[in-house]
Image (cartoon, rainbow, N blue to C red):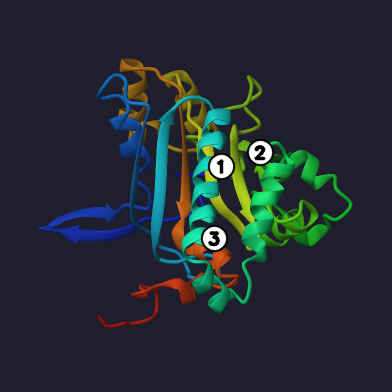
Amino acid sequence: MGLGSDSEPVPVTVLGQQTYLADSMQFALEYCLRIQEGVPGVCYINTSFRDEDPDAMHLNQFYHVECELIGTYHQGISVAEQYITKLVSVFLHNHDNLVERTAGTTKHLVAFLEHLRANGNKLPQITVEDALRMSIMDHTCWKYVVPSDHAKGRALTRVGEVRLVEYFGGAVWLTDMDHLSVPFYQAFTDESHTKARCADLLLTNGETLGLGERHKEAKDVHAALQKHEVASEKYSWYTAIREQKAIKTTGWGLGIERFLAWVLAHDDIRNLTLVPRMRGFSFAP
């Protein structure tokens, strides 16, 4: 996907045809919203696959909740916050003993809900630019998108994300990333095309939910593909659906293992897998 994409697809051969395992169903969800009028949103829960080295925050195969809805970035954040709040409330109401036995406490879940209420039922937000100006941010907290070309922008490291979480009391939205630090499909914030209308929800271990508004017009997709150095013919269908039906959509994805690691106060999602599937290891079944 060019500059800004941090994942590679897993190649497979099915019935003699070479294809890839889905690393996300976002494109399919965007397509679904254009099939039938009056559908406010679509979602799914399933496995996603990434051809990358597994670590404490990354898996080759993980469970994914993804939602795509008709509406703006701000509406998407509202829906995502409501969803997370509902999950936390269910864990506290129905599974508090399990969480207590595993994590040793449920205080972090209670604190999350209190944090939300204290901010008018909204989580705090901070832009990447404002975050980078904070005194708590040293050289370990950020990196250049392209080390050899500083003009392409900066992105926060996991160290930086964790420091923001600590500063904001447990949860914060990191917003308005440099556009070349995220995939091409995220909408531009303005005509300068330098920032993306997207956000990451940071919890204790870092990014747990990623969200973004999509390009509405085909011309913006073309501009983004060019900016990210991606051949436009590979995504001709993606621009075509906007020529046929230009609608504003916003989507988000929640990594279930990352979320459960936060709920259970654990720092390595590799220990949250029921049937591990990780590069370099063989497991049964």
Measured in 3D between alpha carbons, the distance from the residue under mark 2 to the one under mark 3, in whole angstroms, is: 19 Å
**Residue situated in front as seen by the camera: 113 or 44:** 113
Image side of residue 240 versus residue 89, left or right: left
Q: Whole-percent x and y of residue 143?
A: 71, 54
Mark 2–mark 1 Cα distance, whole angstroms, equals 7 Å
Dot in front, 3 or 1 = 3
- Disc 3 or 1, which lies upstream in sequence? 1
Q: Position of residue 218 (x, y in %)?
A: 42, 20
Identified at 46% across, 19% down, the residue is 219
What's under tag 2, amino acid-wise? Lys
Q: Residue at x 37, y 21 (%)?
A: 242
Q: What is the three-letter code of the residue carrying label 3? A: Leu
Asked whether 82 or 128 is in front, the reply is 82
Is any part of residue 157 visible from this angle?
A: no
Bin the neighbour count of mark 1 within 10 Å (Cα to Cα): few under 14, some 14-19, many 20 and up: some
Give the residue at mark 2.
122
Callout 3 environment at 10 Å: few (<14), some (14 to 19), or many (20+)?
some
Task: Name the side, left or right, on which 235 lies relative to 187.
Answer: left
Q: Are marks 2 and 1 in contact (CB under 8 Å)?
A: yes
**Which of pointers 2 and 1 lies earlier in the amino acid sequence?**
1
**Element class at badge 3:** helix
Return the mark for residue 92.
Answer: 3
Give the image location of residue 135, x and y in percent. Answer: 89, 52
Quadrant position of the C terminus in the picture: bottom left
